[in-house]
Image (spheres, rainbow, N blue to C red):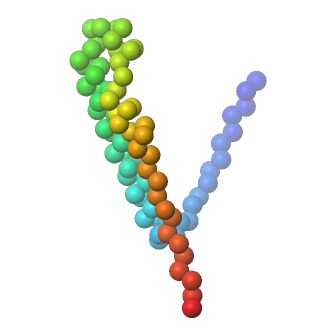
Amino acid sequence: MNIQRAFKVRLYPTADQQVLLNKTLGSCRFLYNKMLAERIKTYETLKGNREALYTHKYKTEKEYRGNRITRKFPQKKQKS
């Protein structure tokens, strides 16, 4: 028998962390929606050709694979 567990976690980010989270999640949403639109367009174009659907390489795979986004976390200001 397989038992599934779930945990609820609540975050209390600082203002800087909240800005970073919003930017990161916004980028993820943008990328997901762009790739979903491309998949839908490709499906509509190739839906009659089953072989082409399975072997099609999406241009976003090449475009985004090498362009990993790296962000620097904001440093806390030291009190003087």
Which residue is drawn at the image coordinates 40% and 57% (left, top)? 23
Count of numbered tags? 0
Counting from the top left corner in percent of width and height, residue 5 is at: 69, 39
Front one among 59 and 8? 59
Which residue is drawn at the image coordinates 73% and 27% (left, top)? 2
Q: Based on the displayed image, in which of its 4 quarters is residue 49 positioned? A: top left
Counting from the top left corner in percent of width and height, residue 76 is at: 54, 76
Counting from the top left corner in percent of width and height, residue 7 is at: 65, 47
Please say whether residue 32 is visible from this viewpoint. no
In the image, is residue 60 above or below residue 27? Answer: above
Q: Residue furthest right?
A: 1
Front one among 37 and 71? 71
| Left-right relation of 75 to 6 | left
Please say whether residue 30 is visible from this viewpoint. yes
In the image, is residue 80 above or below residue 10? Answer: below
Name the quarter where the N terminus is drawn.
Answer: top right
In the image, is residue 49 above or below residue 62? Answer: above
Q: Based on the displayed image, in which of its 4 quarters is residue 45 positioned? A: top left
Which residue is drawn at the image coordinates 43% and 37% (left, top)? 65
Name the quarter where the C terminus is drawn.
Answer: bottom right
| Left-right relation of 52 to 66 | left
Q: Residue furthest left?
A: 45
Which residue is drawn at the image coordinates 40% and 44% (left, top)? 67
| Left-right relation of 49 to 80 | left
Q: Residue furthest bottom?
A: 80
Front one among 3 and 47? 47
Counting from the top left corner in percent of width and height, residue 36 is at: 34, 32
